[in-house]
Image: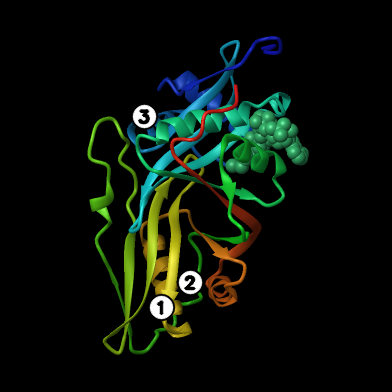
Amino acid sequence: METKGFKPEIRPFNGSLADAEGLLSVERTTFHESPYSAREVQRMLTEGPQRAWLAVAASEVIGFVVAFPTFGWQNRRWEIDLLAVRPDWTGQGLATRLIRAAAAAGAGVAHWARAVTAVHNQASLRAFQRAGFRPSAEPCHLLLRRLPGPNPLSRPTPGVTVQRTFPAMRLQGTGGDAPKGPSAFLLLAEHHGRPAGYAELIPVQTILYRGIWIEAVDASSPLVRTALLRETVELATAAGLDEIGMMVPRSDHALQETLLTAGFRSLGGFYWLWATLPLPEPPA
Ligand SMILES: CC(C)(COP(=O)(O)OP(=O)(O)OC[C@H]1O[C@@H](n2cnc3c(N)ncnc32)[C@H](O)[C@@H]1OP(=O)(O)O)[C@@H](O)C(=O)NCCC(=O)NCCS
């Protein structure tokens, strides 16, 4: 349909199959990665923690943003996970408006919103900054491990044991319509019976994949770090997940090495973008 000449509106995903199909049609012209059908996306966006907003012109979906809360051990966050505008509609401020709509809803859930953008994605960086987000000072390497596959870290690590804790349910929001989101859980390592490190993991379902985000890894030695990452790969594989990802500071060469040995590959440099919620009012 010819949508030019119509002023696009930004509105929440309405739960319909038509909206899910429209969202997926934009996804196919941008990321082109989602393995899910429109029905599956419809279910995810209505029954799970993910929420979406659409840019619509003449009843046609021309852009979308998807966000969801995560509950970490230190804070809860509103994750602006995916943002896309159909190529023939870019450069008109739609991404900025979509980010603002998602962030406004997030203000009822968390004090912080964050997103991840490739260092070379100037349009995305500009849109987030225009909406009120600030990039981290140092870019990270985004390291990704697709599953299933061999676990090259399967060698036993003598003297190291790793235990899994309960999820951080205590940080979940208590009330109202706030979507309940995935909670972090910890892997705690001991070396010869002494605390020796941890990994903070968040299981996530997005409209592109089901996986684990590694929020943080801290270990007293390379042996302990290897044990924590081996356990992460094992439990994600056993759960039938699609991938594991981590944003690793560029300066943390030791962690990058261990992840690369574990079969992760680098997708290049990415910035964290952060904002406190609610965002400041846009200039009139
Ligand atoms: C990134 C994307 C969402 C931006 O959508 P958009 O509607 O064009 O964004 P906006 O118009 O709100 O803002 C884009 C800003 O970047 C600028 N911009 C656009 N293309 C640019 C480029 N190639 N280089 C530098 N700046 C650029 C625009 O001028 C605008 O800046 P301004 O506000 O100072 O004028 C869109 O290009 C897209 O869908 N890309 C593919 C998917 C993607 O990369 N998503 C983001 C990662 S999750």
User: What label does residue 227 carry, if any?
Assistant: 1
Residue name at image x 45 percent, y 61 percent: 214
Give the crowd class for mark 2: few <14, some 14-19, many >=20 residues within 10 Å. Answer: some
Q: Secondary structure at mark 3?
A: helix
Q: Quadrant of the N terminus?
A: top right
Residue 2 at x, y = what percent? 70, 11
Cβ of mark 2 under 8 Å from ligand 1: the answer is no
Query: In terms of image quarters, where does ligand 1 lie?
Result: top right
Distance from the alpha carbon under mark 3 to that under mark 1? 38 Å
Give the crowd class for mark 3: few <14, some 14-19, many >=20 residues within 10 Å. Answer: some
**Which badge, 3 or 1, comes first in the chain's sequence?**
3
Q: Secondary structure at mark 1?
A: helix
Q: Is residue 106 left or right of residue 162?
A: right
Q: Is residue 227 left or right of residue 66?
A: left
Q: Which residue is mark 3?
A: 46
User: Looking at numbered disc 3 in the image, what kind of residue is underneath it?
Assistant: Thr
User: What label does residue 151 carry, if any?
Assistant: 2
Distance from the alpha carbon under mark 3 to that under mark 2? 35 Å
Asked if marks 3 and 2 touch (Cβ < 8 Å), the reply is no
**Which badge, 3 or 2, comes first in the chain's sequence?**
3
User: Looking at numbered disc 2 in the image, what kind of residue is underneath it?
Assistant: Asn
Distance from the alpha carbon under mark 1 to that under mark 2? 12 Å
Q: Quadrant of the C terminus?
A: top right
